[in-house]
Amino acid sequence: MQDLSVLSEKMAAIKEEITSKVNELESSKAVYEFKKSFLDSQKGKISQLMKEMKNIAPENRANFGKSVNELKNWAGEVFDEIDQKLKAEEMKKKYESEKIDITMSAKMRKRGNLHPVTQVRNQLIDIFASMGFEVYEGTEIETDYYNFTALNTPQDHPARDMQDTFYLSPEFLLRTQTSAGQIHVMEKKKPPIKILSPGKVFRSDDDATHSPMFTQMEGLVVDKGITLCDLKGMLDVLVQKIYGEGTTTRLRPSYFPFTEPSVEVDVSCFVCGGKGCKLCKGTGWIEVLGAGIVNKKVLENCGIDSEEYSGLAFGIGIERIAMLKYGINNIKLLFESDLRVLEQIDD
Ligand code: PHE
């Protein structure tokens, strides 16, 4: 039989050991190991004590069991307490070491932007789409028929000299105007027609304001009772959206073989407001596009009854609009891909 007093001493010694060493523990891992040495169900010192039960006189067992349990519970609480305290300290250290300094300045990435011609093109499409226009993209290689003949410009017509043409063969050429698209649309679609046709055009022309390749945006409306008033109304909305409220247009008589009457459209100078400045060469007006009422012969060429329907057409030079809008004086600057220029233009 075990002597109870020996066991009590053992318990006191365990308590003493725990009390004296627990505060020296420096990590939750050390707590775990220390705890295990007392409470491990097999080898723990307290668990071992429990095993003495069978060696004790039966009348003392209940008391002994109670004391060991108390010791076990007490030890459990002591270990939990120190464990929580050390874990909290460890988390704090971890957070501090992993802290992200959000005040540090970030690396700035350079953002690209759309080419100015694309920006203006998209802007024009947005404005006309809001007026119900649909986009039709034609082809850059055209036949002489679509680019000239069907547009009332037969082979010997003097108007052909207005546009120096790059011929690929006697029949094929690089389109000189997006007007060629008008014919394709009117051949395929019956009125009402309301289309916008943006694209590259080509002319043997080269100076500060002309480039052998440039971009046009054709507009075509065919319906009953279309007049120049409709044209003026639409263009006023357009220039106000591009150059600001208060901007207006004026129409001057002009000549194109495929429109009759034909007009040259000027926009009131958005720099001086009409007083006269360098940009408008003192006139208060800037020429921006050609337009007119579709020539009856062109409608007939496409099988549209010119007694029943009438149409309006306009052709906008996109580079010209971009140059005026961004104050660029040489069209080549738009095609040289010089980042010093392009980076300045972002709407
Ligand atoms: N195609 C003409 C040009 O390139 C512009 C235009 C289009 C004029 C439509 C009238 C009607 O100069």
Image (spheres, rainbow, N blue to C red):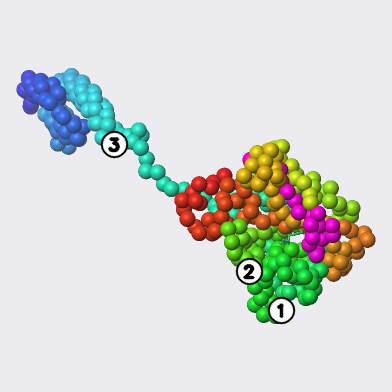
Q: Is residue 17 left or right of residue 116?
A: left
Which residue shows up at 14% across the image and 25% down it?
22
Please give the label number shown on residue 204.
Answer: 2
Residue 109: image tag: none
Residue 98 image label:
3
Please tell me which residue is depicted at 84% across the width and 51% down the height of the picture: 228
Tag 1 secondary structure? loop
Q: Picture quarter containing residue 65?
A: top left
Ligand 1 quadrant?
bottom right
| Circle 1 residue | 171
Q: Is residue 180 magenta?
A: no
Q: Main secondary structure of the magenta part?
A: strand
In screen coordinates, is 323 left or right of 254?
Answer: left
Indicate whether 80 appears above or below 147.
Answer: above
Q: Residues within 10 Å of mark 1 (few under 14, many from 20)?
A: few
Residue 134 in the image, given as x and y percentages of width and height: 73, 55
**In the image, residue 10 lies at what x, y percent?**
8, 24
Which stretch appears magenta? 253-271
Residue nearer the viewer, 36 or 160: 160
Residue nearer the viewer, 101 or 287: 287
Task: Check disc 2 and give the amino acid type.
Answer: Ser
Q: Quadrant of residue 152?
A: bottom right
